[in-house]
Image (cartoon, rainbow, N blue to C red):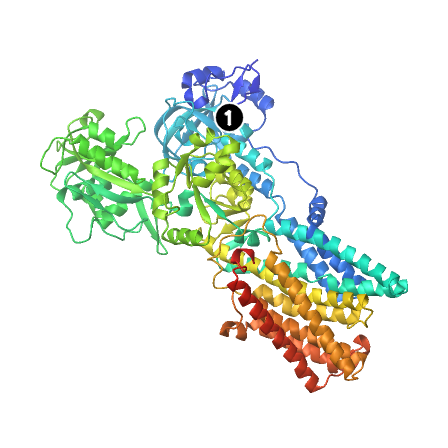
Amino acid sequence: MNVLTDVPNGNQTVNGVLPKAPWHALPAAEIMADLGTSDQGLDPAEAKRRLEAYGLNEPPAPPPRHPLLRFLSQFNNTLIYFLLAAAVMAAILGHTVDASVIVGVVLVNAIVGFLQEGKAESALNAIRDMIAPHARVLRGGQQHDIDTRNIVPGDVVLLEAGDMVPADIRLMRARNLLVNEAILTGESVPAEKHEEPVADNVALGDRFSMLYSGTIVSTGQATGVAVATGDKTEIGRISAMIGEVQTLVTPLLEQINRFGRIFTVVAMAMAAAIMAFAMLVHQYPWVDALMVVVALAVGAVPEGLPAVITITLAIGVQRMARRNAVVRRLPAVETLGAVSVICSDKTGTLTKNEMTARRVATADRESTVSSSGYAPAGRIGDGTTVLTPTEREVIRAALLCSDAQLVEKDGRWSVLGDPMEGALVTLALKAGLHPETERGTWSRIDEIPFDAQHRFMATLNRDPAGGSRIFVKGAPERVLSMCARQAGGEATAIDAAYWQARIAAAAANGERVLGFAAATAPAAMERLAFEEVETGLVFLGIVGFIDPPRDEAIAAVADCRSAGIAVKMITGDHADTAAAISRQLAIADDPRTMTGAQIDEVPDRELGAVVEETSVFARTSPEHKLRIVRALQSNGHVVAMTGDGVNDAPSLKQADVGIAMGRKGTEAAKEAAQMVLVDDNFASIVAAVNEGRTVFDNIRKVIAWTMPTNGGEVLSVVLAIVFGLTLPMTPAQILWINMITTVTLGLVLAFEPPEPNVMQRPPRGRNAPLVTRFLAWRIVFVSILFTIGVFGIFEYAMRNSLGEDTARTMVVNTMVVMEIFYLFNVRYLHMTSFNLRGVLGTPAVLTAIAAVVIAQFTFTYAPFMHPLFDSAPVRIGDGMIIIAIGIVMMAVLEAEKAAMRRLGALRPVEI
């Protein structure tokens, strides 16, 4: 009995025999012998034995995780520890409202994370669902309709147009076979397939003798032998790569975790030092010293900061959803703002995935065709010249020698049939030829279907005068070889040099080219035979096609470059095509192109330098995409990867932000991505980057506002202990300040709109600190200003014999007023706040200030608040002094900001 074994290159064979070459490079007969099968298929008993030996034809299912473990794992994060610590602190101090809010935020995050967990498993399931449910096979010479999971290596599989390929198959017979391999190669045009072997080292997109699991048969029929099933197929290998890729921690979470650890150590050390100082130097009883430490902790711990940061991210998600970008994971909003490189698939992402006839060349002249897509808008030439007879004959031949139809629905044009034939129908409409009228007038009598072997299609049509005419389209070099002369021009002989130049020019622009020819046939001819078209035709001309760039993608790429973001095109398409599109998109000043085969020759240690200088990667496989993304990440880049096919799923998951296309994207790509573009619009990425940068700006503003206000409280307590002074605020009053301002003034910064220059700054580095040198200076400087204001107003009240309760009430109001004015200053970190937009504020800012003012009036003048917080009424004149302190502080900070800008220390990327 034959025994199945696995071999290193993923092939499956029998008796442990290793094929002399990959399946696509071996003759079909030799493969049949290696696999122990025949053109009659496997014996049913042998098929059963192989199924038992090798297993089902499906990707391996990952081991399930218990839901409870998945839920608990959401709490295993330093940011969550920080939130919970803040909640415990607030609860210990009796601040149950703050504690409840923080715990609620933690639970919401855990639930969302629980629902979004297991993206790798979901991606595998999406790939598994793409496998065709049933397939026709030959077993024992009889056709059987079987579950695709029961296909085994050696099965002879029968396929026709519309079928999804159920396994990796080596072709035995192919007739007029075109296969849509876009999910694996990114090619927008179906690939021609034939049974002849190809070179063993060709890229996946050039393995014309192979069909791959999950691809779609567009036209034709095929018979082949299954050579790989389950996890040994191309889709199976992609599934394995998705399972192996580890999800990266986002830059924000890295920084929050690092900040939380440092802050915890510093706060604990400071509290211990102050408690020791109070007991040893000032002889404080340990209970009183502990109360000082509690006051210090209340001032130091920014209990609302993590919650406000989370809310800022959530607001970013909502804003991006309104701009057609659906975020699947909360921190991805901020991460996108840090992106320094976008690796984009070409087909359907940067291009329209709609073939367009771009040029028509005859012996007389060459004309360009305007507009793009399938919509019949645009013109041929400059719009002022009339089509030559030869041009009209080329376009008529193109229309009559095609079967595609255009469909318009809701203003959007699409094609039924081959994309290139659809482009020819659009070309005819631009030339003023109506497809239905022309096809009716020039009725088709017979045809020779396109076949990958002879590389042309021919039709026999009845002309309006009752005669017959033959039209041929195909690969230009093939059609030229069938022609005796050319139409138009001064000479009738074929000018081979002229046509080679025209074909080369089209190829240099990334265009695919079809040649067209015609001949007069006897009026009585009813059947079209090969011998009728193999010689003696008249060559009419060529048409060049391209999948054009999206108009909005061109502008989006320009915006990315102005924002300091490099765009890399990674595609399975041909190098010339990719290079031409990259030049049209202006991805780089002089885009360098590299193929997958060239990438294979570069070791990992050198790839980092290579990818920095290369803008276009063509004929790539999933492994190439992963290597490119990893190499960029090793250089310190924050990488976003866009894509829509199964082949993009591993690199989407590896990237810091995976961005899938919502309309044309496969489920596998969507599940692996962190964000989905609903409108498949590359321009939406620019909007997402804008929102991401705004989110991070706002998070820094929250920190820049929260830490100095807490720092002022801490510094006031520390100085009071060091110099043996009366505490200017009680722990309850400090907690009041934190509660009333954090949920109002601190939160409104999450709603701040983008600053005007947000997209003119270079991206921040992957390891850029959350608290930069400028923010660290700001925290210290503003903390000192707050401390001066606190002791200044406290000393003023005590010298005027207003009493300790009134003095402390004035301190609380001074802190709040300074925080309000500082809020206006911190809203613009990169420019002055003295402008109309800055003074007027936003509705959120004005609402928050109104709420704080009402709360402070209640704190100061409501009798029931006095015993709770030891507060007392403040005179109107003293209140005006408090407001003046706030104005002076803002003027000082604006002068400091202007000085920093003049000195060049306030670089945008470091703020």
Question: What is the residue that sits farthest to the left in this orientation?
Answer: 490
- Which of the pair 86/233 is nearer the observer? 86
Q: Position of residue 375 (x, y in %)?
A: 30, 51
Q: Position of residue 840 (x, y in %)?
A: 53, 75
Q: How many marks?
A: 1
Q: Amino acid at mark 1?
A: Ala
At label 1, counting other C-alpha atoms closer than 10 Å, the crowd grade (few under 14, some 14-19, many 20 or more) is many
Question: Measured along the vertical axis of the image, is residue 180 above or below residue 771?
Answer: above
Picture residue at 78% right of the left edge, 78% below the top: 871
Please say whether residue 548 is visible from this viewpoint.
no
Question: Measured along the vertical axis of the image, is residue 529 above or below residue 501?
Answer: above
Where is mark 1, residue-wise? 228
Residue 833: quadrant of the picture: bottom right
Q: Is residue 316 left or right of residue 474?
A: right
- Which of the pair 310/122 is nearer the observer? 310
Question: Measured along the vertical axis of the image, is residue 683 above or below residue 505?
Answer: below
In the rendered image, the quadrant that contains the C terminus is bottom right
Please say whether residue 397 is visible from this viewpoint.
yes
Picture residue at 52% right of the left edge, 69% below the top: 832
In the rendered image, the quadrant that contains the N terminus is top right
Q: Position of residue 301 (x, y in %)?
A: 73, 61
Q: Is residue 882 left or right of residue 166?
A: right
Classify mark 1: helix, strand or loop.
Answer: strand
Q: Position of residue 658 (x, y in %)?
A: 52, 46
Picture residue at 72% right of the left edge, 86% below the top: 875
Residue 502: quadrant of the picture: top left
Residue 488: quadrant of the picture: top left
Question: Measured along the vertical axis of the image, is residue 317 above or below residue 874?
Answer: above
Q: Is residue 626 left or right of residue 803?
A: left
